[in-house]
């Protein structure tokens, strides 16, 4: 049932649009057909963090079904092409997935691997596996065995013979499961690479020389402190990081050339509401909307005034205007919050890329606090103006 306030708004400002007509319109622009022929480095990968969790990252439940949902997409949520396996070892259950040192649930590692394998078809874009491994190297062969048995030929275990490694494209890897394995430096080799770098670059400044010397000293200390220490990643597992090696960079990595490892992946990681999630029966509440625009480290934020909501169809009737320099990765997040004493509670939210926003009147879907689609929607009127 459509509220009288929403019907009145559409009658006065809808330019002939009807409620049912707006429901049929997608919240984002229709995308151009995907071109998967370019090298992997030309793409951003839609990624899922702590994929196995169904809700809160401190005490939420976990399920292997979460991998199916992430890889296939759900409602207005686009599918992810990179999912995370956060694996730990237990004496009773063997390898499990869980958010360590929290109260979250767990999933058997094998069940998650089976779910991933079943979700990948022969012509699908590759599924990237971000493996966060908390298992000692001597037990990691069992992880490799489980993955090989669950994924079979879908697991990419060898380099592609027909294509240059630097030119591998998503199309080349269709139907494959590609491991992203944690990479740790071999102290001697890394030190040599960094030592040679200043000699090869005669134009480097004294500042960069100092930076390089600092890196050399750090690697030399690393080599001394790790002499005789067992590797964190078993060799058979490390070899699966064929086209993706993950590492945690230090400040300034964007301005430096990554010499080693090859194939490095860095984890970086309005309006009226309609039928929003309801308050407790018989109770009213005050609601407001927060809009946040994210562009790199920059964040712009704006919010409406709080209004009383009695029937889950609040009308905020507010406008937000922002100016920013265009970029490939500018995100907009809207949060519907309940105004309560102390810490306000998030009721629902929606996040999307700005360059995919469809203009005009649209209903944006709202997701609840567990990340699942709610029955609620937010009516927005979107407009863009590009400066000279």
Image (tube, rainbow, N blue to C red):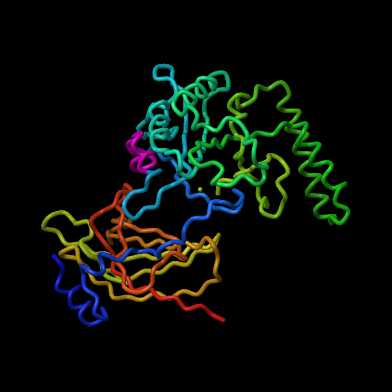
Q: Position of residue 176 (x, y in %)?
A: 50, 37
Quarter that holds the N terminus:
bottom left
Q: Position of residue 93 (x, y in %)?
A: 39, 20
Q: Is residue 245 above or below residue 339?
A: above
Q: Would you identify the image quadrant in which residue 379 lies?
A: bottom left
Our reading of the magenta stretch's main secondary structure is: loop
Q: Would you say 383 lies left or right of 244 here? A: left
Q: Residue furthest left?
A: 282
| Residue at (71, 27) in percent of width and height | 226
Q: Would you identify the image quadrant in which residue 291 lies?
A: bottom left
In the image, the segment drawn in magenta is: 54-69
Q: Position of residue 273 (x, y in %)?
A: 25, 66
Q: Would you say 318 lies left or right of 313 here? A: right
Which residue is more in the foreground, 176 or 361?
176
Q: Is residue 326 above or below residue 216?
A: below
Q: Position of residue 328 (x, y in %)?
A: 54, 62
Q: Any magenta on residue 60? A: yes
Q: Is residue 280 above or below residue 141?
A: below
| Residue at (36, 39) in percent of width and height | 68
Quarter that holds the C terminus:
bottom right
Q: Any magenta on residue 99? A: no
Which residue is more in the foreground, 205 or 383?
383
């Amino acid at each position: 049932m459509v509220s009288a306030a929403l019907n009145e708004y559409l009658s006065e400002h809808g330019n002939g649009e009807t409620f049912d007509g707006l429901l049929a319109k997608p919240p984002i622009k229709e995308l151009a057909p995907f071109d998967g022929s370019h090298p992997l480095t030309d793409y951003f990968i839609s990624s899922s963090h702590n994929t196995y969790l169904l809700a809160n990252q401190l005490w939420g439940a976990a399920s292997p079904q979460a991998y199916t949902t992430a890889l296939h997409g759900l409602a207005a949520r686009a599918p992810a092409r990179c999912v995370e396996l956060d694996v730990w070892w237990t004496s009773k259950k063997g390898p499990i997935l869980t958010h360590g040192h929290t109260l979250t649930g767990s999933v058997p590692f094998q069940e998650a691997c089976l779910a991933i394998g079943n979700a990948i078809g022969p012509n699908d874009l590759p599924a990237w596996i971000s493996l966060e491994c908390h298992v000692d190297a001597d037990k990691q062969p069992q992880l490799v065995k489980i993955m090989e048995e669950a994924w079979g030929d879908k697991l990419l275990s060898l380099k592609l013979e027909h294509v240059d490694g630097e030119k591998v494209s998503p199309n080349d890897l269709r139907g494959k499961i590609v491991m992203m394995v944690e990479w740790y430096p071999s102290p001697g080799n890394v030190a040599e690479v960094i030592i040679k770098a200043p000699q090869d670059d005669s134009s480097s400044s004294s500042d960069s020389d100092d930076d390089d010397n600092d890196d050399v000293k750090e690697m030399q200390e690393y080599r001394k402190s790790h002499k005789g220490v067992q590797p964190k990643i078993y060799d058979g597992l490390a070899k699966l990081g064929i086209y993706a090696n993950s590492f945690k960079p230090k400040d300034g990595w964007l301005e430096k050339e990554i010499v080693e490892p090859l194939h490095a992946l860095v984890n970086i990681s309005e309006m009226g509401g309609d039928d929003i999630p309801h308050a407790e029966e018989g109770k009213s509440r005050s609601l407001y909307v927060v809009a946040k625009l994210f562009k790199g480290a920059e964040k712009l934020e704006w919010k409406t005034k709080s209004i009383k909501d009695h029937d889950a169809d609040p009308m905020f009737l507010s406008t937000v205007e922002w100016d920013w320099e265009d970029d490939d990765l500018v995100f907009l997040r809207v949060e519907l919050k309940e105004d309560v004493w102390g810490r306000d509670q998030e009721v629902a939210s929606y996040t999307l890329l700005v360059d995919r926003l469809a203009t005009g009147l649209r209903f944006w879907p709202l997701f609840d606090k567990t990340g699942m689609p709610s029955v609620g929607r937010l009516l927005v009127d979107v407009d863009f103006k590009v400066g000279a």
